[in-house]
Structure formats: C-alpha cells, structure tokens
Image: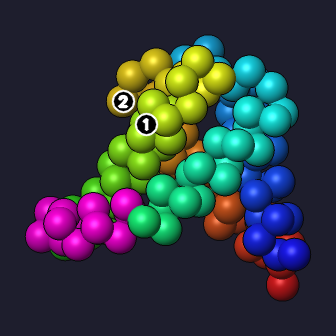
Amino acid sequence: MRWIIGLVINAVILLLIAYVFDGFELSGFWAAIVASVLLSIVNAIVKPILVVLTLPITILTLGLFLFVVSALTLMLTAALMGDAFVINGFGMALLTSILIALIQTFVVKPLRN
C-alpha cells in the first residue's frame, strides 16, 4: 500500500513540475502514473548499475553526481514513454531531478513519519 501511495505522490510531483516548467511535458494524470511506475522500475534496475559505474566521480563530487544519474534515469523514462512524457534537454532533466529530491526530502518524508 505504501508503494502505491508513493507512486501517486511521485505522479503529483511530476504533474506539478510539468505545470510550472515549459520544457517538461506530461500528457495527463495517467501518463504521470505510468511515468512514476516506469521511473521506479528504472530506479530499481538501471540506477544501481549507473551508481556503481560512476562511483569514482561521485566520490570526487561529494555525491552531487547522483543528481546527474537521476537525470539520466528521468531521460530514459521519458524515452520509454514516447510522446506522453517529454523532457526538453539534459538541463531540464537535471533541474527536475533536483526538485524531485528536494520535494521528497522536505515534504514527503516528514509526512510519512
């Protein structure tokens, strides 16, 4: 049940980002739900591999390179979704990954406790 609530919260976060920024587009709520599911699958499968491969540069940047890895997983999710989920450029994906991390850290996680 917690996983489903997390998916819905992530979908709402994605919709809010799409509403605020022009370079981030979602075709609707169901596209946001599908994007949230795909993003969680990509984060479970691909992200650990990328984290291990980029460990030296992550250590050199004191962990800030993880935002780049998150941006890459967002772009992969957008590529898998096609026209329903569009991110215009790597900069937008990087900004989105930072915003998602901030919103989840300061809004979502305190609500769970």
Instruction: Work out whether residue 11 or residue 99 is closer to the camera in this orientation and state it.
Output: 11
Of callouts 2 and 1, the N-terminal one:
1
Query: Measured along the vertical axis of the image, is residue 36 above or below residue 79?
Result: below
Instruction: Work out whether residue 80 or residue 13 is closer to the camera in this orientation and state it.
Output: 80
Q: Circle 2 — which element?
A: helix
Residue 31 in the image: x percent, y percent?
74, 33
Q: Circle 1 — which element?
A: helix
Any magenta on residue 47?
yes
Which residue lies under the disc numbered 1? 75
Span of residues in magenta: 46-58
At 66% from the left and 53% from the top, the residue drawn is 37
- Number of marks present in the image shown: 2
At 59% from the left and 50% from the top, the residue drawn is 38
Instruction: Work out whether residue 67 or residue 27 is closer to the camera in this orientation and state it.
Output: 27
Magenta residues: mostly which secondary structure?
Answer: helix
Quarter-of-image position of residue 40: bottom right
At 81% from the left and 35% from the top, the residue drawn is 30
**What amino acid type is highlighted by mark number 2?**
Phe
Marks 2 & 1, CB-CB < 8 Å contact: yes
Quarter-of-image position of residue 7: bottom right
Query: Measured along the vertical axis of the image, is residue 95 above or below residue 101?
Result: above
